[in-house]
Amino acid sequence: MAKVIGIDGEKVIRLTIPGKPTAKKRPRHRVYKSGKQVTYTPRETVSTENLIALSFRQEHPGFELLQGALSLVVIAYMPIPKSWSQRNKDKALLEELFPTTKPEADNILKLVADALEGIVYHCDSQIVDCRLMKLYGERPRLEIELSKITGNVKSVSGSNMG
């Protein structure tokens, strides 16, 4: 469910997508006997991007695309393995254990950024600050937060670099 709320007069968009987070899969190529070559996006990627887009559109019909520099934060709550002991399950929920398996964080981020392109912003090149964290959760899901940047990016991201 998406929500637009005001923080310092700026819009912050929050969206929760239920289900196990997936990564953006690489394009596939097929060569037919005739020699014709076709490149296509895997079905799972298309389905997930469409789900994210549809979820946003249902909450915000007629939403005007955001302009300027944006910050994107994604938290991917992965399912806790059923084979784990109760002790490890508890540690996972306390954020003492982290999902270091696939899907890879950058591929989840790319899927979300591409899904929102043309729906929330013109181009994902507008995203100048981004973060993705993979955690375990009892309810697998993606939590997405997008906001406009109106100041120093270092102060937004908490970075001490540079």
Image (cartoon, rainbow, N blue to C red):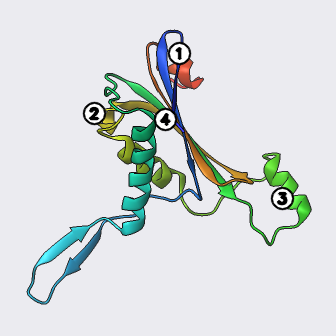
What residue would you read off at disc 2? 122
Which disc is residue 128 wearing? none
The residue at the point 53 percent across, 9 percent down is 8
Q: CA distance from mark 1 to mark 2?
A: 21 Å
The residue at the point 33 percent across, 32 percent down is 121
Which disc is residue 89 wearing? 3
Q: CA distance from mark 4 to mark 3?
A: 28 Å
- In primary-sequence order, the first of circles 3 and 1 is 1
Q: Secondary structure at mark 1?
A: strand
What residue would you read off at disc 4? 130
User: Do the numbered discs 4 and 2 sit on residues whose CB atoms are within 8 Å?
Assistant: no
Q: Amino acid at mark 4?
A: Cys
- In primary-sequence order, the first of circles 3 and 2 is 3
Residue 104 position, x and y percent, is 53, 57
State whether residue 144 is above or below residue 36.
above
**Which circle, 1 or 2, is nearer the viewer?**
1
Residue 152 position, x and y percent, is 47, 15
